[in-house]
Amino acid sequence: MACLFRAPHPRPALSKYYRTSFSTSARCPASLQWKNNDPEALADSLPPYPYGPARWYKQSNLGLYGGQTIQFGNNVGDKIEVKTRRSWKPNVLNRRLWSNSLKTFVQVRVTTRTLRTIDKLGGLDNYLLGEKSARIKELGESGWWLRWAIMQTPAIKKRFAKER
């Protein structure tokens, strides 16, 4: 099962000077980063995301944005109160977050607001395993993939079996 979450290594072309060692292990089909995976390869094992991809802020499909999008408003001048349109973009960071169940760091694009929520809940695993529909909706497609990967680990399976 651990092989499922490692990135595949490209194989060099064979020549008479360079040979690869013989291996009986299967190639790793999936990466923990959503964009590195082939959608057709994961369609069999991964349940479909119930809310579909983001339609307006497509960048949020590739990270944990917590439902944040670009917001629009006005700057209003002091003297003559002229309105000037402007936008506020989410503060997106690339972070390596520790996953207790996967026993590894997961590199993910995450907003600062979502980072605060992750800290408040006690870690990435607790954030991703939230059961409310609003939490699942704000995960997005990449968060749904990470949630599924965490739910496949023996530690989480044992935890869910104990809760039943």
Image: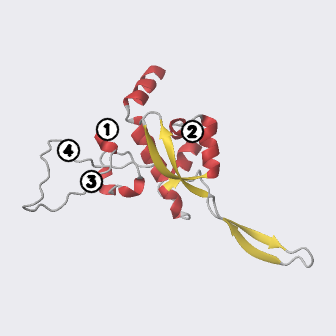
Cα distance, mark 3 to mark 4? 12 Å
Closer to the camera in the image, 136 or 100: 100
Closer to the camera in the image, 58 or 5: 5
Q: Disc 1 designates what residue? A: 2
Q: Is residue 73 left or right of residue 89?
A: right
Judged by depth in the image, the label closer to the viewer, 4 or 2, is 4
Q: Which badge, 4 or 1, comes first in the chain's sequence?
A: 1
The amino acid type of the residue labelled 1 equals Ala
Residue at x 12%, y 46% (from the top left corner): 22
The relative height of residue 112 versus residue 56 in the rendered view (above or below) is above
Instruction: Give the SS element for disc 2.
Output: loop
Q: Is residue 11 left or right of residue 100?
A: left
Q: Which badge, 3 or 2, comes first in the chain's sequence?
A: 3
Cα distance, mark 3 to mark 2? 37 Å
Where in the figure is residue 125, as x and y percent of width and height? 50, 37
Cα distance, mark 4 to mark 2? 36 Å
Q: Which mark is residue 132?
A: 2
